[in-house]
Image (cartoon, grey):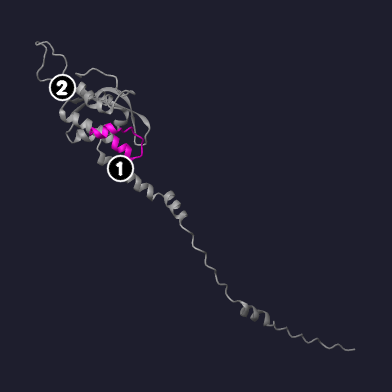
Amino acid sequence: MSHFPVQESPTGPDFQPGEIDSALDQLGASPSPAPAETARTDAPSLARWSELLGVIPTDKRLKPITEFSRAIHEGVIQAATITEEFNLPYVDANGEEVEFKSKDELILDTPEMHDWFRQQATESTYTLVSLGVEVKITEEQIVKGELDFTRLAEIRRAAATTQQQTPSHTAAASARKPKPKPKLKSTPNTSSKTGQKSGSATPEKAPKDTPATNE
């Protein structure tokens, strides 16, 4: 059973990207101690997949969703599927908000799992920006190191290179170049051929001999 109460997603207009860490830490907070007679020292600390996604803004859920199975395969996350299902919106690679539907999972709460969620939430920003999706990026995020300036600069440079190579930009550049003057085509001298055709007489057919008639 999850140790963490279901919380409303702090993704409203007042939610700041830097609050992801504190939101995840709140999910990972230790519950109130149970009575000594019922406490189990071997009970693992678990978190729900839906709760962890719920504390991440919608535009940062793409990579946690798409990379979740890989993280389980690689042993970064240990999870067990449960019967309940959940729906959560997220911003996909096309910049559209769509619904993610899945069976819920109980995830072992570890520092590695928290680090993975923080990293994938940040990677979602880089991925969407590189795909041309408009994502809110503030100076504060870069100054505080929440987003890497060098990484963003590389994405910006790649976008500028693509713009320079687009057909519309190439056509505009070629339109500015002066067009070369068309070369005059030399017309072949056909007078000799015409003369030959006009000067050559068609041989007349010889008149047939008419039979003489007796008067």
- Figure label count: 2
Which amino acid type is marked by label 2?
A: Ser
At 10% from the left edge and 16% from the top edge, which residue is drawn? 40
Q: Which residues are magenta?
A: 125-146
63 is higher (above) or lower (below) than 6:
below
Left or right of 207? Residue 193 is: left
Q: Which residue is mark 2?
A: 45
Q: Which residue is mark 1?
A: 155
Q: Residue 140 lies in magenta, yes or no? A: yes
Depth order, front residue of 112/102: 112
Can you give x and y, in whole percent of width and height, for residue 184 in the image? Answer: 54, 68
Depth order, front residue of 67/125: 125
Can you give x and y, in whole percent of width and height, for residue 215 in the image? Answer: 90, 89
Q: Residue 62 lies in magenta, yes or no? A: no
| Among the two numbered marks 2 and 1 on one chain, the one whose residue lies closer to the N terminus | 2
202 is higher (above) or lower (below) than 14:
below
Determine whether the residue tagged by mark 2 lies in a helix, strand or loop. loop
168 is higher (above) or lower (below) than 146:
below
Picture quadrant where residue 60 is located: top left
Q: Is residue 167 visible?
A: yes
Determine whether the residue tagged by mark 1 lies in a helix, strand or loop. helix
| Quadrant in which the N terminus is drawn | top left
Picture quadrant where residue 88 is located: top left
At 30% from the left edge and 27% from the top edge, which residue is drawn? 57
Q: Is residue 146 visible?
A: no
Mark 2 to mark 1 CA distance (whole Å)? 39 Å
Left or right of 175? Residue 138 is: left
At 32% from the left edge and 46% from the top edge, which residue is drawn? 158
Q: Mark 2, residues whose alpha carbon is within 10 Å: few (<14), some, or many (≥20)? A: some
Q: Residue furthest right?
A: 215
Can you give x and y, in whole percent of width and height, for residue 10 in the image? Answer: 29, 22
Which amino acid type is marked by label 1?
A: Ile
